Amino acid sequence: MLFPSDDSYRSRRAEDEVVELDAITRPREAEERLAHWADWHASRPYTVGIEEEIMLLDPSDWGLAHAGEHVLAGLAPALSAHAAAETHQATLELATSPYERVEDTAREAAELRGALAAALSEHGLCGGSAGTHPLALWSDTRVSRSARYQLVYETMRELARREPTFALHVHVGVADPESALALQNRLRTHVPLLLALAANSPFWQARDTGLASARTPIFQAFPRVGVPRVFHSYAHYVEVVDQLLRVHAFPAPTFLWWDVRLQPSLGTVELRVMDAQISAADTAALAALVQTIAHLELEEGYASERSLRAEEVIHENRFLAARDGMNARFIDPVAEVRISAREALDDLLHAARGHAEQLGCEEVLEPLHGLALENGALRQLRFARRHGLPGLVEALAERFAEPLPFG
């Protein structure tokens, strides 16, 4: 099988859960199985899958609705197969199947939003999408009762009860582990620009944080987050991660919450740094950009060796992206000058044009021009100045299930 079907995808996610539960209840048995976690399940190159963390909203006051378990229990099978609990009970994850054409992935992601919106309406609730809920308070947070998330609470303590954050994750299929490791290393250099484009969480605890992505430092409180280091080979990566698994530092590789991480059980590289997006069209454009960058890097090797090794510059640019979004002025480690995020995007899109044409995703990329001028964070700030924060949350709900502008 060249790329996973819905059934095999769900099966592999279930296998990950088994390993996690084993590590909680039968550590020796789990240790014996850890040698298999790194087996690479080959995917068709450049297939794309999207995962969106969705906020559940109570329209009576536009606060968070802590009803994830109740909603999940009542979903129709077709939607339930693509929905899962998250750390907080006010969050559900929607996951598409993998497709070769990002347009098909985007269409399914939009359909899942629409189906969830309809299901939520039966409970008197709404869905919404942004990196943070503008009004949420940690004291109201409830952790999901599943074994995985109770383990998160046990190990993270009160950090797990911080305000929920909501991310967009994009998976890109890779045929072999060495190519996947090379892609992870190279995607690191693109993390700041992708974060700047996707920044969509300016509000925290009903305050304007002055940050474009408050989600980024909030989530940074967890361990095993941020930009991963360069690994020299897949064997090197496995050696480093397996040591932590052998001593039960955490129960499964899915407890690595890096901005970019390998998913051996799915045969993908997962880009995790982006905030959840207001509309399905913006989600689609960012997924298309990730796919295009992957093609550019693996087929051409766009990032220079000096850029790949500029650890401090990557981390500084990541902070600038979280703070300033597309108004950031990044550090160019090769020319040793500052360059605006918009210039960096123009340069990247120029270099990647032929790759986008090969992938057939030029139309899906179109909303990037709007995000470059006014990303989600700027849109939220502009709207909140006119309508207040409850009005902003209501607007997020209204735009949640908007149809795609293509296809």
Image: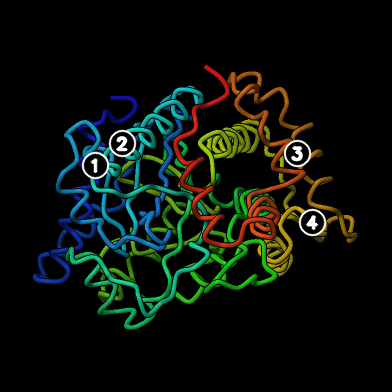
Q: Secondary structure at mark 3?
A: helix
> Is residue 125 placed above or below 404 in the rendered structure?
below
Q: Is residue 286 left or right of residue 378?
A: left
Q: Considering only vertical position in the picture, is 350 above or below 11?
A: above
Task: Label 1: state its secondary structure.
Answer: loop
Q: Nearer the viewer, mark 4 or mark 1?
A: 1
Marks 3, 4: nearer the viewer = 4
Q: Name the residue rendered at 22%, 34% in the picture.
A: 8
Give the residue number, with chain letter if any, for mark 3. 348
Going from N to C along the chain, the mark reached first, 3 or 4, is 4
Residue depicted at 49% across the width and 51% down the height: 394
Q: Are marks 2 and 1 in contact (CB under 8 Å)?
A: yes
- Res. 174 in view: no
What residue did someone put label 4 on? 327
Q: Which mark is residue 122?
A: 1
Q: CA distance from mark 3 to mark 4?
A: 17 Å
Whichever of labels 3 and 2 marks the residue nearer the N terminus, that label is: 2
**In the image: residue 107, left or right of residue 40:** right
Identity, as a three-letter code, of the amino acid under mark 3: Leu
SS of the residue under disc 4: helix
**What label sits on residue 118 in the rendered view?**
2
Dot 1 amino acid type: Glu
Instruction: State if disc 4 and disc 3 touch (CB < 8 Å).
Output: no
Residue 214's image quarter?
bottom right
Amino acid type of the residue tagged 2 in the rendering: Ala
Give the image location of residue 264, x and y in percent.
Answer: 34, 46
Q: CA distance from mark 4 to mark 2?
A: 37 Å
Mark 3 or mark 1: name the one nearer the start of the chain. Answer: 1
The quarter in which the N terminus is drawn is top left
CA distance separating discs 4 and 1: 41 Å
